Image (tube, helix red, strand yellow):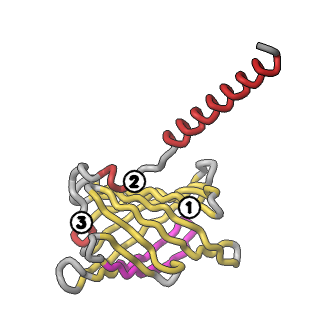
């Protein structure tokens, strides 16, 4: 075997090994799906949990993990309509650590397949969500005021029911695929 043939085999083997490692890394980086939590308890039903008054406490961390802002929320929630196709209103009053206040009113609709859609004044388009087991995953684009401008940021928002009274929420914010920070929140049902 000459030097050229031997080098070609090594290069081919290196490419094959590189491709195999890349596929393994991609498989390992696959994001969780809401169906991964289908067997988890307690079973979440958004219509039951987000009904009545809830208190929430949260914080926003930047991409380095530094806490940028803390906040509390009082939510007044109700559902109306035929069973299985109800419409929910989640009226959220935010109070931030700097004393500023904000209000967001979500209108949620449960579809026939058990998924949810939602709209709010500061949400671009329609949010889409799905619940399975104790988890709810929610994706939407929020129009966020920053330094006198409004930027559109994408939220990958996960909620996990811990008990009949407590739900934990972790949302990743990104723009153009780059992580901007995270919102961590705990809900407590009154």
Between the residue at mark 2 and the residue at mark 1, the CA separation in whole angstroms equals: 17 Å
In the image shown, does 102 or 161 lie closer to the viewer?
161
Which is nearer the N-term, disc 1 or disc 3? Answer: 3
Res. 190 visible in picture: no
Residue 107 placed where, x, y %?
37, 82
- Residue position marked by numbered label 2 in the rendering: 33
Q: Quadrant of the C terminus?
A: bottom left
Q: Nearer the viewer, mark 2 or mark 1?
A: 2
Q: Which residues are magenta?
A: 90-109
- Label 1 – label 3 distance at C-alpha: 25 Å
Instruction: Note whether 32 is above or below 159 in the view shown.
Output: above
Percent across and percent down for residue 87 are 29, 82
Q: Secondary structure at mark 2?
A: loop
Nearest the camera: 43 or 17?
17
Quadrant position of the N terminus in the picture: top right
Identify whether 127 is placed above or below 66.
below
Of pointers 2 and 1, the one earlier in the residue sequence: 2
* Secondary structure of residue under mark 3: loop
Helix, strand or loop status at disc 1: strand
Asked if the residue at tag 1 contacts the one at tag 2, i.e. Cβ–Cβ closer than 8 Å, the answer is no
Q: Which residue is mark 3?
A: 45
- What residue is at 54 percent from the left and 79 percent from the top? 124
Q: Which residue is mark 1?
A: 173
Front position in the image: 20 or 150 = 20
In the shown orientation, is residue 147 left or right of residue 123? right
As drawn, is 1 to the left or to the right of 74? right
The residue drawn where x is 45% and y is 61% is 157
């Amino acid at each position: 075997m000459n030097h050229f043939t031997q080098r070609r085999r090594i290069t081919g083997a290196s490419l094959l090994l590189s491709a195999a490692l890349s596929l393994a890394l991609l498989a390992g980086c696959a994001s969780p799906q809401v169906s991964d939590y289908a067997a988890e308890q307690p079973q979440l039903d958004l219509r039951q949990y987000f009904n009545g008054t809830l208190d929430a406490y949260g914080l926003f961390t930047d991409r380095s993990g530094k806490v940028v802002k803390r906040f509390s929320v009082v939510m007044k929630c109700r559902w109306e309509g035929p069973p299985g196709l109800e419409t929910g209103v989640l009226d959220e009053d935010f109070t931030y650590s700097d004393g500023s206040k904000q209000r967001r009113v979500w209108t949620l609709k449960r579809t026939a397949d058990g998924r949810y859609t939602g709209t709010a004044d500061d949400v671009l388009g329609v949010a889409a969500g799905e619940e399975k087991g104790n988890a709810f995953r929610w994706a939407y684009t929020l129009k966020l005021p920053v330094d006198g401008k409004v930027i559109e940021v994408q939220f990958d928002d996960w909620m996990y029911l811990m008990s009949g009274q407590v739900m934990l929420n972790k949302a990743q914010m990104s723009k153009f695929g780059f992580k901007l920070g995270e919102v961590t929140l705990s809900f407590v049902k009154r």
